[in-house]
Amino acid sequence: MKLEHVVSIDAPRSRVWAGLMDLPAAARCVPGARDIAADGDVVRGTLEVRVGPVRLSLAGSVIVEQRDDIAGTARLRADAADQRIGGALRAFVDLAVTGDGPTQLRVSTDVAILGRIGELGQPLIARQADKVLAGFADCLRKTVAAT
Amino acid sequence: MRPFEYLEPETLDEALALLAEDPDDTLVLAGGTSLVILMKQELVRPARVIGLRKLAQLRAIRSGDAGLTIGALATHGSLARASDVNAFSPALAATFAAVATVRIREQATVGGNIVHADPSQDPPVTLLALDATAVAMSKARARRIPFDELFVDVFETSLEPDELLLRVELPALPVGARATYKKFLPNTLDDYATVAVAAVVATDADGRCTHARIALGGAGPVPLRAHDAERSLVGRRLDDRSITEAAALAAAATDPIADLRGSARYKRAMAGVWTERALREIA
Amino acid sequence: MTGPALFMTPERRLDGTDKISGATKYTGDIEFPGALEAAFVRSPYPHARIRSVDAVRARALPGVRAVITGADVGGARLGRRLQDWPVLCWDEVLFVGDRVAAVAADSRAIAEEAVRLIDVDYEELPALLDMEAALRPDAPALHPESASYRFLEGRGPRPSGPHPNHQGYVSESHGGDVDAAFAGAVRVFEHEFTTPRIHQLALEPHAAVVWIVGDRVHVVSTNKAPFTLRDQMAASLGLEPGRIVVDNGPIGGDFGGKGLSTDEYVLYFLARVTGKPVRAITRMADELTAMNPRHASRIRLRTGVDATGRIVAHESHATFDGGAYAAGKPTPRLMVEGGVQTLEGYRVPASRHEAAVVYTNHVPGGHMRAPGQPQNVFASESHLDIIARELGISPLELRRRNLAHSGDPVTSGGPWHGPDLHALLDRAATEIDADRKRGPGRGVGFAIGVRHVGTGSTTITLRLDRDGRIEVTTGVGEQGGGQHTLIQRIVAATLAVDPARVSVRRLDTDSPKDPGIGGSRVTPVHGGAARAAAEALREKLGGRAIADAAATLLEPIEVSVKYDATAADHGACAHAMEVAVDAETGAVRVLEAVVVVDVGQVINPVGLRGQLEGGFVYGLGMALTEDLAVEHGRIRASNLGDYKLPTIADVPPLRIVHLNDGHGVGPYGARSSGELVNPGVPAVLANAVADASGARVHTLPITAERVWTALQAKN
């Protein structure tokens, strides 16, 4: 399942990039994230997602797989598992910043749904992922603007 | 299914008190047609379930000069047959008759349907077009929520976890108002709508539109009002031109979720087609 | 030929009262005191290496009696012909739903909870998710060690294809030089069609109970061919067949899916570890995503015609997605055989067929009501219709010019032998009033369906008691098709007794071998055996009336007959359908459907109607709604809200018309019926939609959106 988001952030490109690459801080920008902690290159934490009566508690990690500071691109890999329902999500997140003050941030996500979570139905999961990413971008915009 | 504690309060106060004790781990059971499936799939695993079936007063259907009041526990089947509902709006009765199959209709309740907030359901669409208001209550307070503000997202309403939906109130319709509900079921009759349209219009002696409501189901994450389309009709005659313009505006108002019932592009186009058909029927 | 008068009376089903009243005990209803319930850990990946399985937390859960993993099954692989499917995976998983571990616990809820507590560490591997990719020269072999797999009952050598990812591969030609025949064609047409995976969807899910007493392994299973399951289990588990006894309950629907069993093997290991009966009932989500659905297909057809539209040459390239394992296919060539010979029933002087079943990282394909044939007929009959329109000949006329007469060369290589196809088509045209001018948005389509009559061998025993009652014993079960009632009525008719005096009892696998249900076999094979046994009894009684003979008996007498049905024959039908297409939405409404069939002598009139009308509705699902759509290798539908079947409200006005040429080879001139009607329904619907709207849909199902998209492209 592929999701695309482009947001415009009214801040210099270098600040946006620095904000993104501070992974623990960026992770705290994800709506529903808690217990964020850096563990070497890996950032661990839990993402609480609620879809109506269904609650997921996705415990997992994020790591930067590739990073090119000059080009302003990076690939993150996120893995998270839920033990209430059973199942996991795995996402590759490609980040790219273009332009400069305002800076365009493109977030391309490829999410795979593993196990029983899939029984929630793909459209619903896509929508939740959409919401989480939109919230993340919004938070990032504010965080960067504040620095 | 996981074990859970099951409670059957005798009174509304008792139900609200139980709900207030642990709203986050308690779920409310009305007809159970959606909840029990989620529980069997173990997508939801409540610690407690409160069954409402002893609260007979929540089944009441009442009409008067002020409009129609529907108790949250009225089943779709009883609403489809109720003379009060049919007298208020045949389109509303037809909407309830269009829900799922006879087995579901006789078990599922309108309140359960609304709080489940599945954007493909039938009744919320017509209720939205009829300017419905939800009346909810918690131990602490009672509150009225217009349907425009009730649906937040897929499977999400603006009700708080400790609130119980008691009834739906529908104001009297403008004199001469006509309404219709169109459910597009291209694949099998036992399905959710690919898209659905409820439309209500009233016209003056000149044939000019004085009141227009267009609500769309399956066309976004929540039942939608096509406000631009409604505004475009008011003050105009309901002719080919105004209807096709309104239909195009309704299609533009959609934000469909692609699923097995169709791509977003197809659903958007179909929202236009069925809005046009609905308006032609009641023009 | 007309059969005995009894066959004209509607039957009373032997299993009817119990099924209607709910008294029938299906496999999942059987209560075993002390039985454990099983649940399985399934792979979330289409292709991955198992690094480790950690079951410490699961084993600690109260109520859990055993947890086993791939390491505990001793390398056992299961399958109906090629045993290529690990009972539990120990090394790699090859599709989403492949099993890695199993739990036996005091209740299903505990077993499922334990499943969630098992941590499997996977290393994800690249997945082969499309057939073309799997057949590229550099594609990795999904089964590099396949040479070591067991191949059961090798009638001839184990099949192999040009690529290691071929499960089955067939290349055959008939009628001489096909290239020369194409060179002589006035016009040549080529089209491609695709169909998705679809599910058999019996109401009863797969279920099984296994327990071990002494050195005997007892199995109660929903498998429709218990003797074959016994032999497959024996081979897979390294047991003597005689140590396993399979005793099936009534089966709650089959449609081909009940030919493959997968749980029984795991349950054997769980029963061995725990010393208790262990039961599994497949969740609907697992039925939809991890059991053997109909193969998805891509079929390319090329046909050359002469100046008058007569076919001079034909070739087909059919590719079927076999998924991760060939285990679901019982056929010696590991082929969905109904998909090989395209344009079946037409006169084709020279033809060439290439058909391949391909290993991919999808759910393993299996058998489903006329395996391969609906895909084939959809492609073939759509192809013919397009050719007709291109040539400016009516589709009906093109069919008339090309349908085989008795003795004509057909694409199976032999001369046509079966019902009068012209009579069937002509009658269908009359019934639908083909020449009537229709309004805009309305149209008519046609299609031909041909299905072989099955062959095989079984033993049936009759026992006549002194009170004149006859008990029939047979190894064949009752899966809803009316098998036992068919046997009862043939025995009753042959011996001229009231069917109420004839009872039928199914035996377990400690009895003479039976091939089970499948391959359009029961009417010719079991029906033939019933007649032969009844005739043998009559002969033994010196031709006296049963009641008279019984009264003189000192003790019951028994006759047992082994019967071999070998005669080649076909059932055939012609479909006609009128549809209305909503040009603004693409929605298709079937206004009327006619199926003209020749199934020979009718034996169970009510059951036959169920098979033919039910077959139509079954085909309508494939035509309009059914699609096990996949995303990232995972089947999206996990319930019947997302996998849509037609309901009774969707069934259009339908007429079945019977013709009988009197040459059926089954008992009393009967032919098989169960797999006859469904294959042609998607084809006739596609053709009617094209006639009504000009929208030609090359992909199933023919959804409103596909028709709408085709109409948008046309305008």
Image (cartoon, coloured by chain):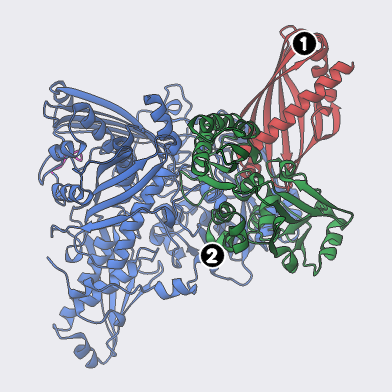
Residue in the image at 21% along x and 52% along y: C431
Q: Secondary structure at mark 1?
A: loop
Region of the chain picked out in magenta, as a range: C410-415
- Return the x and y of residue A27 as percentages of the image width and height: 81, 27
Instruction: Looking at the picture, tell me which residue is in the foreground, C549 or B169.
Output: B169
Whether labels 1 and 2 belong to a single chain: the reply is no
Q: Going by the image, does C510 lie left or right of C437?
A: right
Q: Is residue C335 visible?
A: no
Q: Amino acid at mark 2?
A: Gly
What is the crowding at mark 2: few (fewer than 14 residues within 10 Å), some, or many (at least 20)?
Answer: many
Q: Going by the image, does B184 lie left or right of C397?
A: right
What is the crowding at mark 1: few (fewer than 14 residues within 10 Å), some, or many (at least 20)?
Answer: some
Chain C, hue in figure: blue
**Main secondary structure along the magenta-highlighted residues:** loop
Chain B, hue in figure: green
Chain A, hue in figure: red
Q: Going by the image, does C321 lie left or right of C9?
A: right
Q: Which residue is mark 2?
A: C28
Q: Secondary structure at mark 2?
A: helix
Instruction: Looking at the picture, tell me which residue is in the foreground, B237 or C697.
Output: B237
Residue in the image at 12% along x and 27% along y: C306
Camera-near label (1 vs 2) is: 1
Q: Chain of mark 1?
A: A
Quarter of the image where one finds residue A102 = top right
Quarter of the image where one finds residue A108 = top right
Q: Is residue C713 magenta?
A: no
Q: CA distance from mark 1 to mark 2?
A: 64 Å
Where does the N terminus of chain C fall, quadrant-wise?
bottom left
Q: Which residue is mark 1?
A: A102
Where does the C terminus of chain C fall, quadrant-wise?
top left
